[in-house]
Amino acid sequence: MQEIFEAIKKSAKKIHQAIIHEDFGYCEGENCSGEQQLKLDVLSDNIIEEELSKINSVKILASEEKSDPITINENGKYLIGYDPLDGSSLIDVDLSVGSIFGIYENSFNGKDLVASAYIVYGPRVELVIATIKVERYILKNDDFVFMEELKLNEKGKLNAPGGTQKEWYPHHKELVESFFKEGYRLRYSGGMVPDLHQILVKGGGIFSYPGTNDKPMGKLRRVFEVFPFANVYEKAGGFAINDKGERLLDLNIENIHQTTPCFFGSHYEIKRVKEYYSKGKQWKKQ
Ligand code: P6P
């Protein structure tokens, strides 16, 4: 699996250069989630596919930017689901973006995820790898240098509430407000990678992208975004659940682009989510 992480590092350096030097324009096409594609989305996807395709142990690649998975090597061991440039529309306003990788065996179901990683392209370029633990690296003089192991405390201070607020269910609105009443700080950029990275590095808090009236199954994709970060948060001592209180990594997929409501955080905050969502059954609009 080390050769996969080396390929991710090579991709990160090339994508970072592309972000700085390449065209920010939009392509004609849309991706399969109906989102307009930036030329950088397609370029980043091509960079990652080229690097990962060189590895014999890679069996299948599934990209958020492509409608279907592609088979690389029938005899390979790993299936890799990735979001090549998550939050790419934030590049226009010079905010941080990221790449997300889930490494699976046998299937793209949550239980088959064996490792995950993400890259943050911000003022610095950082790489986080979650295997049995969560390790943080920083790009220095063309090398990724180990910084620290990341761990979540029992409770944090940051609240990252995603989704369109006017479409939130009443119990979700009550939940989010309950954290602010306790003095939590709002930390939400609209980029999943920097928003979750911030909570992790600062030691705790809650990130939520719930089901809403307009998007009952949420927005974030299970294979490319949710399962990889659920693994990171659990290996850092945190929790990752859906709107039914189920562990995200216990979920299966029916299609490669399937989404799910998702909550990532420290123990105290996730316990609160379960309290409000168990009450919410009566509140949710039928
Ligand atoms: P909203 C970016 O488009 C993304 O997929 C994630 O990176 C981010 O968490 C989410 O969408 C933001 O969505 O609806 O809050 O703008």
Image: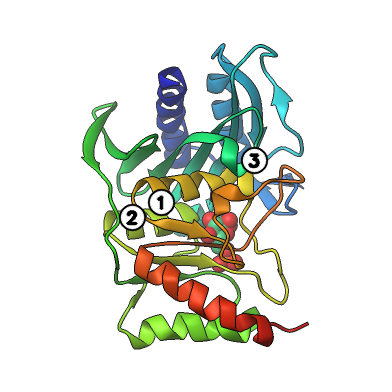
Circles 2 and 1 in contact, beta carbons < 8 Å: yes
Within 10 Å of disc 1 (Cα), the crowding (few <14, some 14-19, many 20+) is: many
Marks 2 and 1 sit apart, C-alpha to C-alpha, by 8 Å
- Secondary structure under the numbered disc 3 in the rendered image: loop
Indicate the amino acid at tag 2.
Answer: Leu
Marks 1 and 3 sit apart, C-alpha to C-alpha, by 17 Å
Q: Residue at x 28, y 47 (%)?
A: 150
How many marks the image carries: the answer is 3
The residue to which callout 2 is attached is: 200
Marks 3 and 2 sit apart, C-alpha to C-alpha, by 24 Å
Indicate the amino acid at tag 3.
Answer: Asn
- Image coordinates for residue 98, horizontal then vertical, percent: 46, 46
In the rendered image, the vertical position of residue 271 relative to residue 147, given as above or below = below
Q: Residue at x 57, y 11 (%)?
A: 56
The residue to which callout 3 is attached is: 109
Q: Is residue 24 visible in this depiction of the protein? A: no
- Image coordinates for residue 253, horizontal then vertical, percent: 71, 46
- Secondary structure under the numbered disc 2 in the rendered image: helix
* Mark sitting earlier along the chain (1/3): 3
- Image coordinates for residue 282, horizontal then vertical, percent: 67, 86
